[in-house]
Image (tube, helix red, strand yellow):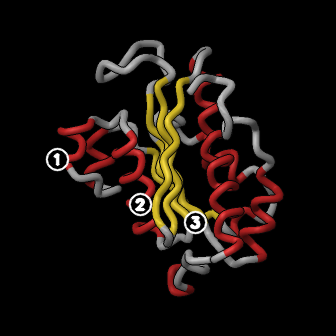
Amino acid sequence: MNDDAPRTDPVEWAPLLERLTDDEMTVAVAESLTGGRLASRLTDAPGASKVVLGGVVSYATEVKISVLKVPEALVDDHGVISAECAASMAEGIRDLMGSTYGLSTTGVAGPEEQEGEAVGTVFVAVAAGDGTSVVPLSLDGDREHIQERTVDAVLSELAARMNESEAAPDGRGAEDPALR
């Protein structure tokens, strides 16, 4: 994919927030290259505390393994800049927080390549009760642009997954009230 590929256009968070609130669904985030930008975007809207449970900025591989439970063998086999790692991060944060949806971002924002992957190589994932989807991206631009486009892409994927699940909802509802 390139920077003009589908599912990377900016997504308005407010309508998604309203849908999540109405359906009593929640989100949690596991971020690497976005360094907290996704959580910031999610919590910018009033009422976000009803659906955003929290997140983990897992810049270090050790945090991905110890906190998000990304298997060390997966990291050894595929690296942290991979679809497999993005999926595992999304599933790990969903399990950790008990959320309906787990969102993750991993990739290379620059200025240098990492794990042999070029700047702009990105993977975003959305985990839900009916499975995990991963979107690979190849983005151009500077570090800030890559990070912002990554946030746009994962929110676009969340919107797509929510549209799919409207026909046959299979995700978890609101988190355990004991966690509040």
Give the residue displayed 72% in from the left and 69% down from the top. Answer: 20
151 horizontally vs 125: left or right: right
Residue annotated with mark 1:
73
Dot 1 crowding, Cα within 10 Å, few <14, some 14–19, many 20+: few
Residue annotated with mark 3:
53
Label 3: state its secondary structure: strand
Label 2: state its secondary structure: helix
Q: Nearer the viewer, residue 143 or 10?
A: 10
The nearer-to-camera label among 1 and 3 is 1
The quarter of the image holding the N terminus is top right
39 horizontally vs 91: left or right: right
Label 1: state its secondary structure: helix
- What percent of the width, then of the height, locates residue 131? 46, 64
- What percent of the width, then of the height, locates residue 21? 75, 72
Dot 3 crowding, Cα within 10 Å, few <14, some 14–19, many 20+: many
**Image quarter for residue 112?**
top left
Residue annotated with mark 2:
91
Q: Amino acid at mark 3?
A: Leu
**Image quarter for residue 53?**
bottom right
Looking at the image, residue 38 lies above or below residue 112: below
Q: Amino acid at mark 2?
A: Glu
**C-alpha distance separating marks 1 and 3:** 29 Å
Give the residue displayed 63% in from the left and 59% down from the top. Answer: 161
